[in-house]
Amino acid sequence: MARSAALVEALKRELRARRLTYADVARHLAMSEASIKRLFSRRDFTLARLDRICELLGMEFSDLARAVATPEAVISRLSEAQERELVADPKLMLVALCALNHAPFEEIVRTYDLGEAECVRLLARLDRLKFLELLPGNRYRLLVSRAFSWIPGGPIHRLFKERACQDFFRADFDREHELLVLVNGRLSRASIAAILERLRRAAAEFAERRIDDARLPLAERRAITLLVAARRWEPAFVRQFRRAPPNAAAAAAPPTARGRRAP
């Protein structure tokens, strides 16, 4: 019973970290919100339902199980203040990204323009942020889950959009290990939901492979960024030709145009 309670608590933490509500879970499982609340209060989940909720979270059930087995490593997202601290110090951000990729201390210092003492100080700051645990011999242990991600719309995302987005797209995406796919169209709600689930799974697989490849030397791993985005959107050159809905046109018209007598 204690294990099932811990599993449900871990599930709640992951939902809160992603700003997902019981209503979001209900929509995903095609159930009522009241039924979802009962499932959580009674801790009465089938494996199939747990797997479906993990799909919504963009993580595997094994990630959830590991979070229960190692409760100190359950951070799937930093706070807004913690992300701001990373953004304010590029070197701190650099070491955090290296740590996410399990780069040994010696390789960080050898690869980047950081002195040993400076790198230790930066690791110590990440230790205070509970991002990792600094161990003897300049080793460290990550305290983030395998499903770790940045806050949607948070400081890291804003930094990318404001400063790095143009640099990222300044390429033809035709070299080895590069890909740019642009598609658009009109899909049903069910089809959109299915596509988004697959994209979340692709992002989860990326995180899994990053951890699986951590045993390789840094020189054998290539820096690669996966950007997954989807939204309801039409380009401005298309939107400009959209007709206003009849009710919107009527509401925008002056009183005399709507049939009211002028004073």
Image (cartoon, helix red, strand yellow):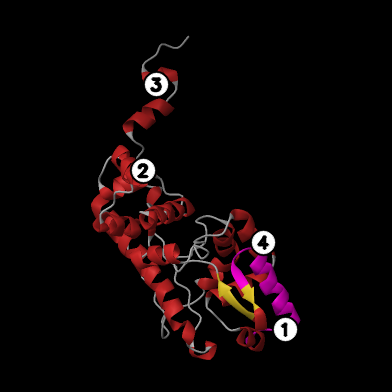
Report the disc number at residue 41: 2
**Nearer to us in this view, 252 or 164:** 164
- Judged from the image, the secondary structure of the residue bearing numbered disc 4 is helix
Query: Which one is closest to the eye, mark 2 or mark 4?
Result: 2
Query: Which one is closest to the eye, mark 3 or mark 4?
Result: 4
Which kind of residue does numbered mark 2 sit on?
Ser
Q: CA distance from mark 1 to mark 4?
A: 21 Å
Give the mark nearest the N terminus, 2 or 3: 2
**What is the count of numbered marks?**
4
Give the quarter of the image for residue 21.
top left
Tell whether position 122 is magenta: yes
Query: Which one is closest to the eye, mark 1 or mark 4?
Result: 1
Give the mark nearest the N terminus, 3 or 4: 4
Give the mark nearest the N terminus, 1 or 4: 4
Which kind of residue does numbered mark 4 sit on?
Glu
Q: Residues within 10 Å of mark 2 (few under 14, many from 20)?
A: few
Give the mark nearest the N terminus, 2 or 4: 2
- Judged from the image, the secondary structure of the residue bearing numbered disc 3 is helix
Give the quarter of the image for residue 228.
bottom left
| Disc 3 target residue | 257
Give the mark nearest the N terminus, 1 or 2: 2
* Dot 2 and dot 4 residues touching (CB under 8 Å): no
Q: CA distance from mark 2 to mark 3?
A: 57 Å
| Disc 1 target residue | 116
Q: Residues within 10 Å of mark 1 (few under 14, many from 20)?
A: some
